[in-house]
Amino acid sequence: MPFLGTIVNCLTVLGGSLLGILLSRVFSKYHRLASVPDAAMKAISVFVIFIGAKGAMSSDKELVILLSLVIGTVIGTIINIDSLLERFGSFMERKFVRAKPQLTGHEELDGPRQQKSISKGFISTTLTCCVGALSIMGALNSGLEGDHRLLFTKAVLDFITAIVFASAFGGIGAMLSIVPIFLYQGAIELGAMALKDLLYASINEISATGSIIVIALGLNMVGATKIKIANMLPAIFLPIIFCLFM
């Protein structure tokens, strides 16, 4: 069944977001549990770095990866993808906060853990769930071979991620992320179906480039860097072109 892995992935993010909302009520009642979401997020951050480091070794074409990262980041910076995502998230935040304030989360948590933000929840969940070897390779495998196992594995990780981000930033932003997740992975799967012969030659380089971006994302999550990850996203697709000539 086409898109089965992506659909399951979106459902787990939705379920994780709803569970995160419920858990935030528990955290608000017991002060000693208030730091649990942040601690869990740090643990996931370290795991994200591990996944990125593991996937970055999938190719020995260092020049292809380097050119993809540099040129892709330049393209993303010119377009300013990071700002576009921020503006979209802020627009959704204003819309929901003004029209439906009861959906913004549990305000009693805002004091000790900073104000909840639909924008932060949306961007953090979207980037964490979209950028990386599992997202790309899972969608590619689904499109090329009809094998959804990688996306099922990713769905489990995204379920945990959604719980953490929903409890930390509020559930609306995390739930909204299912739209770009479905569009992103669905587009990769459709592209894989249409370009089977071409993609087989660059799968390892696509995975390695995406994995390096995952490392950067993990470093951002632990607070070590402030890299604009979204501006690096075009780099993931450039190996398809460079592998034709290198």
Image (cartoon, helix red, strand yellow):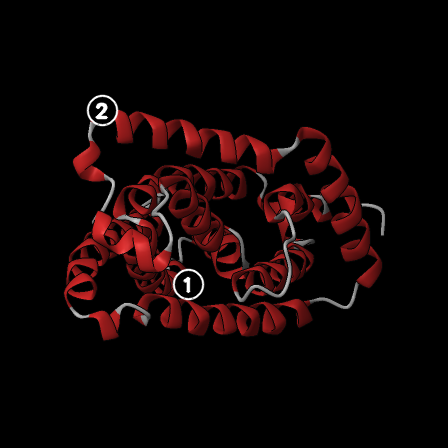
Q: Nearer the viewer, residue 46 or 33?
A: 33
> Against 18, is 78 above or below?
above
The amino acid type found where label 2 is placed reads Ala
Q: Judge from the rendering whether residue 26 lies leftward or rightward of residue 244; answer left or right.
A: left
Residue at x 59%, y 38% (from the top left corner): 82
Q: Estimate the x, y position of residue 39 in percent, counting from the top left.
A: 38, 72
**Label 1: how many residues lie within 10 Å, few (<14), some (14-19) or many (20+)?**
some
**Callout 2–callout 1 Cβ contact below 8 Å:** no
> Against 71, is 135 above or below?
below
Residue assigned mark 2? 99
Q: Estimate the x, y position of residue 11 in percent, counting from the top left.
A: 25, 50
> Against 178, is 59 above or below?
below
Picture disc at residue 12: none
Q: Nearer the viewer, mark 2 or mark 1?
A: 2
Whole-Å distance between the Cαs marked 2 and 1? 39 Å
Q: Estimate the x, y position of residue 220 in percent, counting from the top left.
A: 58, 60
Q: Is residue 243 visible?
A: no
Q: Nearer the viewer, residue 162 or 181?
A: 162
Q: Estimate the x, y position of residue 153 in percent, counting from the top left.
A: 37, 66
Q: Judge from the rendering whether residue 3 lies leftward or rightward of residue 17; answer left or right.
A: right
The quarter of the picture where residue 216 lies is: bottom right
The amino acid type found where label 1 is placed reads Leu
The quarter of the picture where residue 172 lies is: top left
Residue at x 48%, y 60% (from the top left corner): 134
Q: Regarding mark 2 in the picture, which secondary structure is present there?
A: helix
> Against 224, is 92 above or below?
above
Residue assigned mark 1? 150
